[in-house]
Image (cartoon, coloured by chain):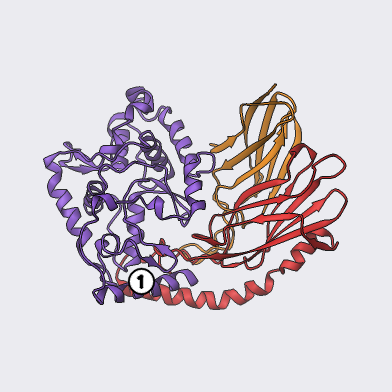
Chain colours: A orange, B purple, C red
């Protein structure tokens, strides 16, 4: 089950710079910690985050183990057209989680 | 390794200070009561205050999904009986409450587990499992901003008294009681950390140290480990009694769930 | 992350816990220097980001609290002076640290559609150290800013180990 919270203003004026925030539940296990038996806990992190605006990539990020658990990122976007902002997180195992939000531009 | 070592030194220093008799014993005056939130750095307070940055909201979201999900042999969801979660407003503020079935007090997480097994016929959710924490956080979140309202149920009184005694009893290798820090030295610091008044206003809460959400009992377990005491078992009568005392001590303070703490 | 080893206390007699404690110290003493040797330096990480191009100080504002309560989630904001047009914009922002086991923290790709070259995130810092933000501009130049952060230690942690 994807637990992701994305924040996009539902409406904006054309040309307005809006604030976008995205947060997803993920342990971001660094691979540098040891478990109760002294064995290393294997690395399990989200390595890539992508935001597309009506299908076109407008922002992306590459994460390393120093990004906090339940990674949070915020950035800006110019509101150009009414459409869909899609968010995609890919982890070490290649598993992809998604979320999306609509924006109405007038 | 640096962190445990440093905190050990800090605890030892605090223990020495307390032995020196600098502290004054006694309850916190009502007008001096402060949520742990107010002791935090402005950045951490801001993280809690905005739902788009508060990581605890991820568990509220999960809990909302579980609330509507049919479970167990009954084929019913929480919502199937209770309706919209807003109906739970005022409920969580009263927990722990007296449970006639067991003849003992039960906390909110315990009540949810009981509901699942007895009414939904669903598999048990372990204490401190993500699913139980999510449901508890979701229900408690419905009352954010409402005052903690412990029930005036005389059947709870003996347990509250037990809780008060545990709170004021020295324990562990460092020989400190809860009250030594949280009643008598709440305006001090323990190494870099603020010693707070230990009001359970934000639970379950997101602790940066845990990198996840956790229960009040998990936090108390951390405290007991801190003073080198053997922690009570999860869900034990002792922990429930302590919860009862803490809720009574914080009666009237606003619920913040999900809180964020360092 | 130099997280404390997450050993559960034995839960049984305290002697068991002491034995575990002693074991934990031994493991760390042996493991840490090896880790330190294997870790590429901050300079190497930045060089792999820039492809060896020179980095000038300026144009970048790196905002981070000077004193943080817990190194597990430190709020960081990077803002770069740029018109963010097709002709002149920020194409990448790299975030690096000095003393974590890995120098890379995150790399962000931006463009003219962002309107403003500003990102925020939350990162882990194993200890007090210097953070570095490097911006790649569309003209191929690199600009940077650094900040010092003091990480305080949590007092009541999960387990002793």
Q: Position of residue C47 (x, y in %)?
A: 80, 63
**Residue nearest the viewer, comparing C2 with B251:** B251
Q: Quadrant of residue B253?
A: top left
Does residue B1 appear in this view? no
Q: How many marks?
A: 1
Chain under label 1? B
Residue nearer the viewer, A58 or C20: A58
Judge from the rendering whether residue B168 lies leftward or rightward of residue B186; answer left or right. left
Determine which quarter of the picture holds residue A74: top right
| Image location (x, y in percent) of residue B230 | 29, 65
Query: Quarter-wise, where is residue B179 in the image?
Result: bottom left
Whether residue C129 is visible to the viewer of this picture, yes or no, is yes
Identify which residue is drawn at 35% across, 75% down: B13
Relative side of B14 to C37, left or right: left
Q: Position of residue B228 (x, y in %)?
A: 32, 69
In this image, B230 relative to C145: left or right? left
Instruction: Judge whether B104 appears above or below B163 on screen.
Output: above
Q: Quadrant of the C terminus of chain A?
A: top right
Where residue B129 sits in the image (x, y, percent)? 41, 46
Q: Residue at x 39, y 30 (%)?
A: B71
Q: Secondary structure at mark 1?
A: helix
| Residue at mark 1 | B11
| Mark 1 neighbour class, 10 Å CA radius: few under 14, some 14 to 19, many 20 or more | many
């Amino acid at each position: 089950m994807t637990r992701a919270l994305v924040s996009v203003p539902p409406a904006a004026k054309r040309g307005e710079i809006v604030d976008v925030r995205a947060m997803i539940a993920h342990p971001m296990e660094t691979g540098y910690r040891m478990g109760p038996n002294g064995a290393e806990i294997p690395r399990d992190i989200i390595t890539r985050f992508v935001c597309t605006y009506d299908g076109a990539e407008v922002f992306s990020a590459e994460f390393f183990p120093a990004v906090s658990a339940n990674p949070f990122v915020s950035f800006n976007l110019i509101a150009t057209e009414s459409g869909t902002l899609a968010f995609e997180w890919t982890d070490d195992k290649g598993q992809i989680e998604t979320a999306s939000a609509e924006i109405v531009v007038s | 390794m640096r962190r445990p070592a440093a905190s050990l030194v800090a605890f030892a220093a605090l223990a020495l200070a307390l032995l020196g008799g600098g502290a004054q014993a006694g309850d916190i005056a009502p007008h001096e009561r402060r949520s742990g939130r107010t002791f935090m750095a402005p950045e951490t307070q801001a993280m809690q205050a905005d739902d788009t940055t508060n990581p605890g909201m991820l568990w509220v979201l999960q809990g909302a999904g579980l609330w509507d999900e049919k479970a167990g042999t009954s084929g019913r969801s929480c919502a199937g009986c209770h309706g919209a979660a807003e109906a739970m407003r005022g409920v969580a503020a009263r927990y722990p409450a007296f449970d006639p079935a067991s003849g003992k007090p039960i906390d909110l997480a315990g009540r949810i587990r009981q509901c699942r097994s007895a009414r939904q016929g669903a598999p048990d959710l372990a204490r401190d499992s993500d699913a139980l924490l999510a449901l508890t956080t979701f229900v408690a979140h419905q009352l954010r901003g409402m005052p903690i309202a412990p029930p005036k149920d005389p059947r709870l009184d003996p347990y509250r008294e037990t809780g008060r005694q545990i709170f004021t009893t020295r324990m562990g290798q460092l020989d400190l009681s809860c009250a030594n820090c949280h009643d008598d030295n709440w305006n001090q610091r323990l190494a870099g950390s603020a010693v707070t008044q230990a009001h359970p206003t934000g639970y379950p809460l997101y602790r940066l140290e845990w990198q996840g959400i956790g229960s009040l009992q998990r936090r108390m377990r951390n405290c007991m480990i801190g003073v080198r005491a053997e922690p009570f078992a999860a869900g034990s009568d002792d922990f429930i009694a302590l919860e009862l005392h803490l809720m009574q001590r914080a009666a009237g303070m606003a619920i913040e769930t999900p809180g964020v703490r360092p | 992350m130099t997280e404390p080893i997450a050993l559960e206390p034995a839960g049984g007699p305290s002697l068991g816990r002491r034995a575990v404690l002693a074991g934990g110290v031994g493991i760390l003493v042996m493991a840490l220097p090896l880790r330190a040797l294997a870790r590429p330096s901050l300079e190497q990480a930045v060089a792999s980001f820039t492809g060896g191009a020179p980095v000038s100080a300026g144009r970048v504002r790196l905002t981070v609290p000077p004193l943080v309560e817990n190194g597990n989630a430190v709020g960081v904001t990077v803002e770069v002076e740029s018109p963010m047009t097709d002709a002149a914009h920020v194409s990448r922002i790299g975030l690096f640290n000095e003393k974590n086991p890995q120098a890379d923290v995150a790399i962000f790709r931006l463009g003219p559609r962002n309107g403003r070259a500003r990102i925020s995130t939350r990162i882990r810092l194993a200890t007090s150290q210097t953070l570095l933000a490097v911006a790649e501009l569309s003209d191929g130049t690199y600009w940077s800013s650094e900040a010092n952060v003091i990480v305080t230690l949590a007092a009541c942690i999960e387990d002793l180990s």
